[in-house]
Image: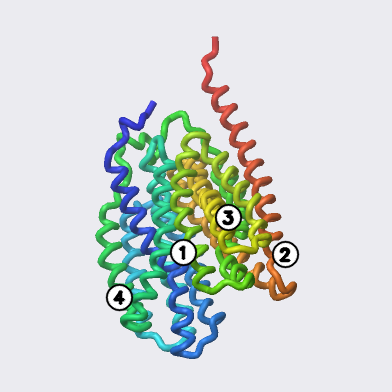
Amino acid sequence: MTTALSQPAYRWVIVTASACILAVAMGAIVNGMSAFIVPMHDTFGWGRGDTTLINLFGILGLSFGGLIMGPLADRHGTRPVVLFGSVMLGLCYLLASTLTALWQFYLLFFVAGFLGAGAIFPPIMAAVGNWFAVGAGVAIGIASAGQALGQGGVPFVSSILITSFGIDGAFAATGVFILVTLVPLSFLLRQPPAVATGTNGGAQPPSETYLPSKVVIVHLSAAIILCCTCMAVPLMHLVPLIQDRGFAPDQAGSVIFVMLLVAIIGRLGFGKLADVIGALPAYMTATAWMTALVFGFVLIETLQVFYIYAVIYGFGYAGVMTGVLASIRALVAPHNRGFAFGIVTMFGWFGHAIGGYQAGALYDLTGNYTASYAVAGAVGLLNLVIVSHLLRLWRQERRQAQGEAAPVY
């Protein structure tokens, strides 16, 4: 059986490069525009809702782009696809520095998501898992933690750049940074060596059991759209909830910043847990943690309790994304992983959009966040039902595989 000792040392170069690439790329496309909302409103007079749609178009591009780019990476390798995405993302940010109309930003950021981030996220996550025969959960957790770090760091740096160089200068500087960092990092990516991959094209022990790709994709797509709907509510609406309690914007922002810092540790912790108890049980644990705690935010009145609660919640909720990514790696055969990552993560981004929107719509309807956070808890429970069913199917398949492999006397 393959052991950790027989795995190539270069796999940690893959993990490190992947974490850095995801930090820059996903930070830029998922929520990097958040730093530009107020400056664009002040400069161009665009409404905040209209400006926020730039970010939405970027995420939509990422969602649909992954459907194309994931399978391309399966067929042609990770490096050329990620390299292409890195170049496109950098060029789009450079081009953004020349735009003056809102519709131009919508179109450009859809392209940046489709051809840029969409060519980076699914291939990267598939590649990391394929390099590890054992310990893939920790590896995916580290790469995913890089993404979490970038989603906090890119908006912070963008704010500094806008103050120093203005909106156009900030876009241009970010584009240059993307090109000079992601292009060299992309060249570090390699396919797993044949000695570690066997005949299946990915590093895994021969004893691993896979389900039909369609079964996994259907179940995890339904599950992730629900769990991301749940997690998007505090991600998008915790700050305004805290402000509704009478606290200043910077105080409210500091709470979610602390939560995201703890989330980095959570992604690593649940990656390790996935290696110990299995990917699906780790995913269920993280989802149960998030579901049990999400409604509690509406019951808090003091800033100190918000901080404490955000730390506890943040550690558990962060394991959801690590868990679902590790589950794809564990349940899908290597030659289909890029396609599976593209499909499943597309539904995850849809869930983020749905969760953020429904919470705001219910607030407008009811005048408070009680119903919004209650819906988050309810969809989290539905997620647990679906994942429990998938876990049952996998255990049945594993028992059958072990029974067929048992010697006959």
Give the image location of residue 172, x and y in percent.
31, 78
Residue at image mark 1: 65
In this rendering, which labeled residue sits more in front, label 3 or label 2? 3
Q: Alpha carbon of mark 3 to alpha carbon of mark 4: how far? A: 37 Å
Query: Cβ–Cβ below 8 Å for labels 3 and 4?
Result: no
Of the numbered discs in the image, which one, if any, rests on residue 309? 3
From mark 1 to mark 2, how far is it between C-alphas?
33 Å
User: For this rendering, which residue is in front, 200 or 13?
Assistant: 13
Which numbered disc flags the more N-terminal residue, 1 or 3? Answer: 1
Residue 372 found in image quarter: bottom right
Q: Is residue 347 left or right of residue 126?
A: right
Q: Is residue 231 shown left or right of residue 183? A: right
Point 44% across, 46% down: residue: 268
Q: In this view of the protein, can residue 162 be seen by the observer?
A: yes
Based on the displayed image, in which of its 4 quarters is residue 357 positioned?
bottom right
Front tag of 3 and 4: 3
4 or 2: mark nearer the eye: 2
Q: Image height check: is 403 above or below 201?
A: above
Query: Pointer 4: what residue?
Result: 173
| Residue 344 visible in the shown view | no
Q: Residues within 10 Å of mark 3 (few under 14, many from 20)?
A: some
Question: Closer to the camera, 127 or 305?
Answer: 305
Residue at image location 68% in from the left, 60% down from the top:
299
